Amino acid sequence: VKTIVKNMKNFINNVSPNYIDDKVIIQYQNMQSAKKPSYFRGLRPFFTKWFELGYPGIDESAVEIAKHFDLKIKKAGQPILQDDPTVGPLTKEEHTSLIKAMSHAYSIGELSLSDYAISLLISLTGRRPQQLVMLKYKDLLQKKLDNDKVEYLISVPRVKQRSKQLQYRELPIISEVASIVQLQANQSVRFVEQTLGKTLDDYNKGKVPVFLNEEKLLDLVIKDCNFLESNKIYAKPTIANRALKNIVKTGNLISNRTGSLLNATPRRLRYTIATMLAKDGHNANTIAELLDHSSTSSTGIYIKNLAESVERIDSAVSEQLSFVAEIFMNGIKSKEKTNFKFCSSRKCQSQNLNVNFPCNECAFFMPVDIDEVNPR
């Protein structure tokens, strides 16, 4: 429903129709096809149902012409498969340059602490901005390990879940990032305490968002005594995109692939983290977990057609396959050479008792005698 309302608002703002007919639909389609065709894809079924219910305001010609529009849906993962230099994953060099640029911008005072913290988290964890702005003071955790070392974690709220109750997933972060995020959390607590004119106890301190919407906070303190329970005091997810744009502009980061300013966005950084994981040999399940996906349905794209994956597979099987190739080319030279196993290393679970699936029908059964391979 929210999507329909949003798309309808865009429709009205663009064409301001008094009556919706085929001319209005064509006008809107021409305006949106090059920008965001998804708006019209969401409106077409709405217009159809509107006409079918018999409500005034829409003509049959509008519904008929809408049915004949070819609304191509862009396949998911195309920027990744095509390694798009503007919207696909960053290269290792681009990603490293971005990290260095944000550290430099913060050190010279061109980047605020909150922008630095959100940029680091986006760049190194791959979490969505809407997840990170929901972090609270209590979500910054420390865990003592057996070797007296400390592991730093953030308890990240999960989004896009069907469950009504908010779920969390703990994510380890390096100490350098943890210290910056902790500084930002402490700054938010101090701002709230200064606004209230009192010190918060540990319970209420834990509720303070790491990334505050300071303007909303000032209004809510006056109107609502339970302002810490309000979602309005969280910073908007757009702070991440704004921070990244500021870093690129300040550091004058130029993409070595386009020759233009680097298009750094939270989405591209998620692509980058996932692609790096795939290149390091992690499977789809691991990538899904680290990106906080509920399934692997959209993570397999990162390991598909990856040149590094082909090299690893070739390296893993070449030793075993080389012996098979030797057999086909020259036959088995000696009965003593039995390092290679034709059958699976797993023990047969049927123990030859499964009459419905006898051994001679097994995929690994090879009734070949060495004397037959090497005829005298």
Image: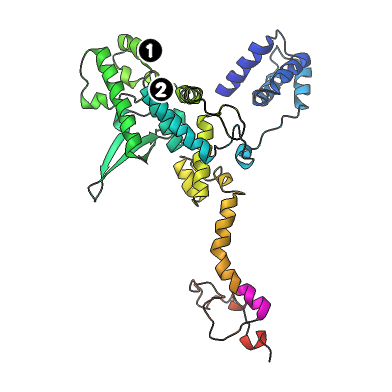
**Left or right of 154 on screen, residue 367:** right
Give the residues in magenta.
324-330
Q: Residue at x 54, y 63 (%)?
A: 316
| Residue 51 included in the magenta stretch of the image | no
Q: Is residue 93 above or below residue 224?
A: below
Residue beneath label 2, please? 111
Q: Residues within 10 Å of mark 2 (few under 14, many from 20)?
A: some
The residue type indicated by label 1 comes to Glu
Q: Quadrant of the N terminus?
A: top right
Q: Which image quarter: residue 53?
A: top right
Residue 51: x %, y % from top left: 71, 19
Q: Which image quarter: residue 215?
A: top left
Q: Residue at x 31, y 9 (%)?
A: 222
Q: Is residue 176 above or below residue 218?
A: below
> Which residue is at the front of the view, 193 or 296?
193
**Mark number displayed over residue 215:** 1
How are the residues colored?
rainbow
Observer able to see residue 198: yes
Q: Residue at x 58, y 86 (%)?
A: 334
* 1 or 2: mark nearer the eye: 2
Residue 125: x %, y % from top left: 43, 37
Observer able to see residue 160: no
Q: Which callout, 1 or 2, points at the residue further toward the start of the chain?
A: 2
Q: Residues within 10 Å of mark 1 (few under 14, many from 20)?
A: few
Q: Quadrant of the C terminus?
A: bottom right
Q: Main secondary structure of the magenta part?
A: helix
> Which residue is at the front of the view, 223 or 141?
141
The residue type indicated by label 2 comes to Leu
**Left or right of 238 on screen, residue 15:** right
Instruction: Evaluate if marks 1 and 2 touch, with contact meaning CB atoms under 8 Å apart.
Output: no
Q: CA gap, disc 1 to disc 2?
A: 19 Å
Residue 91: x %, y % from top left: 54, 39
